[in-house]
């Protein structure tokens, strides 16, 4: 029997039982008055309605005919019937309704660092800027929750058969946060700004020799000198509004107010910011963009609070000053696990940690034997277990498992102290009795290892220093604050060996071609080889996926044999959020801002909707 049939059968039974109960009480009451004459009885009976339902006037007389016990029983029966009907109605509604998101609520997240340039063209080296620009701006393309490229501001993209031309059609009626419409002019201006030397955009190398022209207000043509498939990943960079930025002198780009109070097209828009007495931004509020070109977000607003270190950020999370933290270092996970209000989302991303060698800053690193010896001396298993708590993967090349061209057939440098020492012995740097470090012609073998101020990297550096000094390599460690790593270290390539993270999605050219060793290029290994360069150029020029994958395999074999860097591990990204934030469905991300890919679906409030 169906739930509906059971419900109506019960209701019919209840009605019939109540009628019979009332009739029985009335009959008993009438029988008690035996002094009434038969004539009066007949008159009373003739006046009774033919309906089985008692009239309201009759029901009002019940208290006069019932004794106190009968009246109590009747009232209890009526109350039980009403409660039963209400309960049955609620049960029916509960079974035939669903919870759906409802607009409202505020999410507060802690970020480590502070905003500097909230501008998609300039945010590459600041994690806070990258997070904020992801919510405020949109690119022509974006990554979906599975890490695949899909359209964003673009309605459609057509690629020519020779892979050298891309026709992009914009979605219609997309508005900037100030109400102006997005047009092809904004696409052209954004790309031109990236290519402008004065802007110093880190994306400039990717847009070299790219030409763009307007077809009409919603269509542009991009002409390339490389395969389009390798270029499409660059189109995730956010567009900037031509009608606002065109009035800013290129010499004053980094000083523009728009970098602090940006105007974009994203699901959230800038609202307010607060500063401390020193002028540093303390918090920043984004509010929902109700004119967002897809479904607007459910959250009313997002407040970001900025902290100088992870210890302070984790404490804010513990004290409920924030609902989430941009990243939870491994050393704090055990404490966070005790917080039953937190959900720790474990995300995978195509990022790896590596040590990049700068042969110009330390000529000793030009020797391939020294580089191989240093690689063999690092206990990566210890790093995984002690620093990452076992949640990470040792890697041997920059192309990670699951990505095009990944292969296990590369040169591997597994931990082997004896082999490491043997490589260094071949270079003439030898251990001397009574001396802790290797020497050659009276000089010590010394290398400076630099990394960013980050709990994870600092622990990794400590292990590497211990490993290297055990084979006689004196290791000087330099820890650089987050806000200085870009300007003081990376921009001028001011390091000998740099422990840093990189994210490679599909095109290794910007990270490993010799033309990219100078800023704003992304090649952090200051080292060059013609064969490697040729292979990278062929990868870019090949549109056939199978051929391209094989070229990447061949390139990796050569690269790892030269050992211009030491590939360490691929970490798991832990993102803690309060459980009150619902519908957070993230598994794979290409970069840390990708944790916001589905933020328009996040919600705090819910409502129940009837569903038959």
Image (cartoon, rainbow, N blue to C red):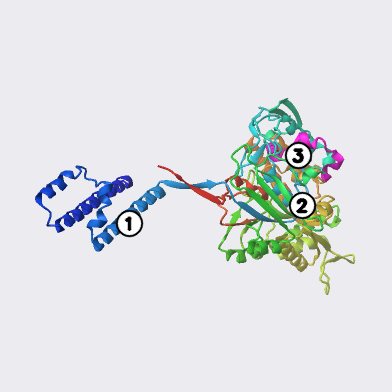
Question: Helix, strand or loop at disc 3?
Answer: helix
Give the magenta range.
230-255
Figure quadrant of residue 379: bottom right
Q: Is residue 594 above or below residue 34?
A: above
Question: Helix, strand or loop at disc 1?
Answer: helix
- Pointer 2 or 3: first along the chain: 3
Q: Mark 1 points at which residue?
A: 79
Q: Name the residue under label 2.
A: 564
Q: Dot 1: within a 10 Å radius of its alpha carbon, few (fewer than 14), some, or many (20 or more) residues?
A: few
Figure quadrant of residue 293: top right
Cα gap from disc 1 to disc 2, whole angstroms: 83 Å
Image coords of residue 236 (percent x, y): 69, 40
Q: How many labels does the image show?
A: 3
Q: Quick check: is 239 in the magenta stretch?
A: yes
- Pointer 1 or 3: first along the chain: 1
Q: Dot 2: within a 10 Å radius of its alpha carbon, few (fewer than 14), some, or many (20 or more) residues?
A: many
Instruction: State the predominant SS element of the stretch in magenta.
Output: helix
Image coords of residue 570 (percent x, y): 66, 54
Between 275 and 476, which is closer to the camera in this rendering?
275
């Amino acid at each position: 029997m169906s739930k509906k049939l059971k419900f109506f059968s019960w209701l019919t039974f209840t009605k019939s039982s109540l009628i019979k109960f009332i009739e029985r009480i009335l009959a008993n009451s009438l029988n008690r008055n035996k002094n009434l004459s038969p004539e009066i009885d007949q008159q009373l009976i003739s006046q009774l309605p033919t309906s089985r339902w008692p009239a309201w006037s009759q029901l009002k007389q019940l208290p006069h005919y019932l004794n106190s016990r009968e009246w109590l029983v009747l009232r209890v029966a009526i109350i039980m019937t009403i409660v039963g009907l209400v309960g049955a109605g609620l049960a029916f509604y509960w079974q035939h309704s669903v919870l759906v998101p409802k607009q409202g609520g505020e999410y507060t997240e802690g970020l480590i660092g502070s905003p500097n340039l909230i501008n998609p063209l300039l945010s590459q080296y600041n994690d806070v800027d990258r997070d904020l620009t992801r919510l405020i701006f949109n690119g022509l393309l974006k990554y979906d929750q599975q890490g695949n490229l899909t359209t964003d501001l673009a309605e459609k993209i057509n690629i020519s058969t020779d892979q050298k031309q891309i026709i992009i059609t914009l979605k219609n009626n997309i508005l900037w946060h100030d109400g102006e419409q997005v047009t092809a002019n904004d696409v052209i201006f954004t790309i031109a700004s990236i290519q402008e030397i004065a802007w110093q955009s880190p994306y400039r190398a990717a847009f070299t020799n790219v030409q763009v022209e307007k077809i009409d207000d919603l269509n542009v043509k991009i002409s390339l000198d490389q395969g389009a498939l390798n270029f499409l990943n660059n189109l995730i960079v956010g567009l900037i509004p031509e009608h606002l930025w065109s009035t800013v002198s290129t010499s004053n780009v980094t000083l523009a107010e728009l970098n602090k109070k940006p105007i974009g097209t994203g699901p959230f828009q800038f609202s307010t910011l607060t500063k401390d007495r020193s002028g540093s931004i303390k918090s920043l509020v984004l509010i929902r963009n109700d004119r967002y070109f897809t479904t607007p977000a459910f959250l009313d607003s997002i407040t970001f609070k900025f902290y100088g270190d992870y210890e302070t950020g984790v404490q804010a999370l513990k004290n409920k000053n924030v609902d989430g933290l941009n990243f939870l270092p491994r050393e704090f996970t055990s404490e966070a696990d005790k917080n039953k209000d937190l959900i720790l989302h474990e995300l995978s991303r195509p990022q790896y940690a590596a040590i990049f060698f700068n042969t110009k800053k330390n000529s000793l690193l030009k020797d391939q034997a020294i580089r191989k010896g240093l690689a063999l001396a690092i206990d990566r298993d210890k790093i995984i277990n002690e620093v990452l708590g076992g949640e990470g993967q040792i890697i041997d090349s920059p192309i990670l498992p699951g990505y095009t061209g990944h292969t296990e057939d590369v040169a591997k440098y597994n931990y082997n102290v004896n082999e490491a020492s043997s490589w260094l012995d071949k270079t003439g740097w030898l251990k001397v009795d009574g001396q802790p470090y290797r020497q050659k012609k009276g000089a010590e073998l010394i290398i400076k290892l630099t990394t960013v101020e980050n709990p994870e990297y600092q622990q990794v550096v400590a292990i590497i220093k211990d490993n290297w000094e055990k084979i006689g390599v004196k290791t000087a460690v330099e820890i650089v604050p987050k806000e200085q790593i870009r300007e003081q270290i990376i921009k001028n390539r001011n390091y000998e060996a740099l422990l840093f993270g990189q994210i490679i999605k599909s095109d290794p050219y910007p990270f490993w071609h010799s033309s990219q060793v100078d800023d704003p290029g992304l090649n952090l290994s200051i080292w060059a080889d013609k064969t490697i360069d040729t292979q990278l150029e062929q990868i870019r020029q090949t549109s056939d996926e199978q051929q391209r994958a094989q070229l990447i395999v061949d390139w990796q074999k050569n690269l790892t044999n030269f050992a211009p860097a030491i590939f360490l591990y691929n970490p798991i990204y832990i993102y803690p959020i309060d459980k009150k934030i619902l519908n957070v469905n993230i598994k794979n991300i290409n970069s840390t801002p990708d944790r916001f890919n589905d933020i328009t679906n996040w919600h705090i409030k819910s409502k129940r909707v009837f569903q038959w």
